[in-house]
Amino acid sequence: MADKLYHLLEYGILGILLTRVLVEYGFFPSPLKKIIGVLLISFLYGLSDEFHQWFVPGRSAVWGDVLADSLGGGLGGWFYLRFISGFPRTNKAKKKKIRVTKTGVGVKRNK
């Protein structure tokens, strides 16, 4: 049981970070789509982790771990959208927009 809690917490952190990326870069317009995206990524990452453990001596792949991973990612994403993203930023720096040109990548500051 403690093992599942560790999976939930670890992937909860992953869910928070993934949701922050989705919010900051404007992926998926609705919060529900952001959560679904985080759930999908968490599921696939957890599945790949369990697949890898299948080949490690002394370890085994367990579907319950994949479920805990997915649930942790989804809860972390929900937590970020519900409690963190609504707060004002503590750093007062202006957001940067990255643009790709023929000569390379440039950073353009919003005015």
Image (cartoon, rainbow, N blue to C red):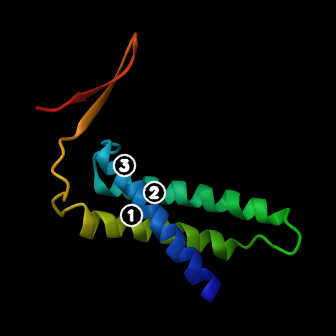
- Provide the residue designation for mark 2: 38
Of the two numbered discs 1 and 3 on the same chain, state the one appearing first in sequence: 3
| Label drawn at residue 11 | none
Secondary structure under tag 2 reads helix
- Provide the residue designation for mark 1: 77
| Label drawn at residue 22 | 3
Where is residue 40? Give x, y as percent: 52, 55
Are the two marked residues, 1 and 3, in contact with CB atoms closer than 8 angstroms? no
Where is residue 64? Give x, y as percent: 66, 76
- 105 sits left or right of 63 in the view: left
Quarter assignment of residue 45: bottom right
Q: Amino acid at mark 2?
A: Val
Where is residue 2? Give x, y as percent: 61, 88
Determine the residue positioned at 46% across, 67% down.
Answer: 13
- 75 sits left or right of 2 in the view: left
Of the two numbered discs 1 and 2 on the same chain, state the one appearing first in sequence: 2
Determine the residue positioned at 40% across, 10% down.
Answer: 102
Q: Quadrant of the N terminus?
A: bottom right
Task: Tell me the CA gap for discs 1 and 3.
Answer: 10 Å
Q: Nearer the viewer, mark 3 or mark 2?
A: 3
Secondary structure under tag 1 reads helix
The total number of labels drawn is 3
Task: Tell me the CA gap for discs 1 and 2.
Answer: 7 Å
Of the two numbered discs 3 and 2 on the same chain, state the one appearing first in sequence: 3
Q: Nearer the viewer, residue 75 or 56?
A: 56
Does residue 48 lie above or below 5 as drawn? Answer: above
- 73 sits left or right of 97 in the view: right
Q: Amino acid at mark 1?
A: Gly
Quarter assignment of residue 99: top left
- Find the residue positioned furthest to the right: 57
Are the two marked residues, 1 and 2, in contact with CB atoms closer than 8 angstroms? yes
Are the two marked residues, 3 and 2, in contact with CB atoms closer than 8 angstroms? yes
